[in-house]
Amino acid sequence: MHRNPQHQNDDDSDEYDGPSKSQRKRDMHKLQDMGAELVALSPARLAKVPLPERLHDAILEYARVGKHEAKRRQLQYIGKLMREVDPAPIREALDAFAGVSRAEIARQHKLERLRERLLEDEGTLGDIAAAYPDADLQHLRNLRRNAIKEREAAKPPRAYREIFRILRDFEYADDGEGQSAGEEGGEGDEA
């Protein structure tokens, strides 16, 4: 078989034409998934995510749309708008909300260690008072006592968890990033 020299040169060229159609489609789906995470955020958290105005408005519009098909189309539109922005800062904010960023994990561990120190030594209340001047020390003292009793009686750790929630609320109040009581960030390994 005789090959045309022009075609041979075309075959030898290793030019990169960009990502494949399949890769572009996977990337588009990732952006749509990120858009789905954004529409699930509370308005207070959404305000903390660095978004262009058009994308922010499209996300707010999603909540107003009523029908299933209209929501699906709005989510696709959000995905399309997401292609025009750098998703890295958005992903970083979403990860921080989910408690998966390194800084967030370190913060959770710090609070867990503080709680353990409190259970071991009531004198830790002084450290808590210094770090969080608005802390209700009497309430924390009662929770500490209850947490110790729960541990000894092998009861569910209600007071133990409540101590963490209180410490977390004070920690996040400094940033204005408080988590709602329903979120259990950093407590997944507790029983």
Image: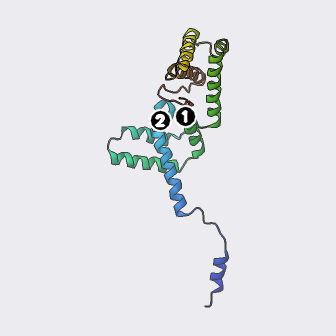
Quarter holding the N terminus is: bottom right
- The residue sitting at 66% across, 19% down in the picture is 117
Q: Name the residue under label 2.
A: 41
Viewer-nearest residue: 44 or 52: 44
Q: Is mark 2 on a helix, strand or loop?
A: loop
Viewer-nearest residue: 39 or 153: 153
Q: Distance between the residues labelled 2 and 1?
A: 9 Å
Toward the left, the furthest residue is: 67
Toward the bottom, the furthest residue is: 1
Q: Residue 97 carries which label?
A: 1
Of mark 2 and mark 1, the one earlier in the sequence is 2
**Residue 20: image location, x then y, percent:** 56, 63
Residue 7's place in the image compared with 71, above or below, is: below
Q: Quadrant of residue 48?
A: top right
Q: In which quarter of the image is residue 61?
A: top left
Residue type at tag 1: Phe
Tell me if label 2 and label 1 are in contact, CB under 8 Å.
Answer: yes
**Residue 26: image location, x then y, percent:** 52, 56
Residue type at tag 2: Leu
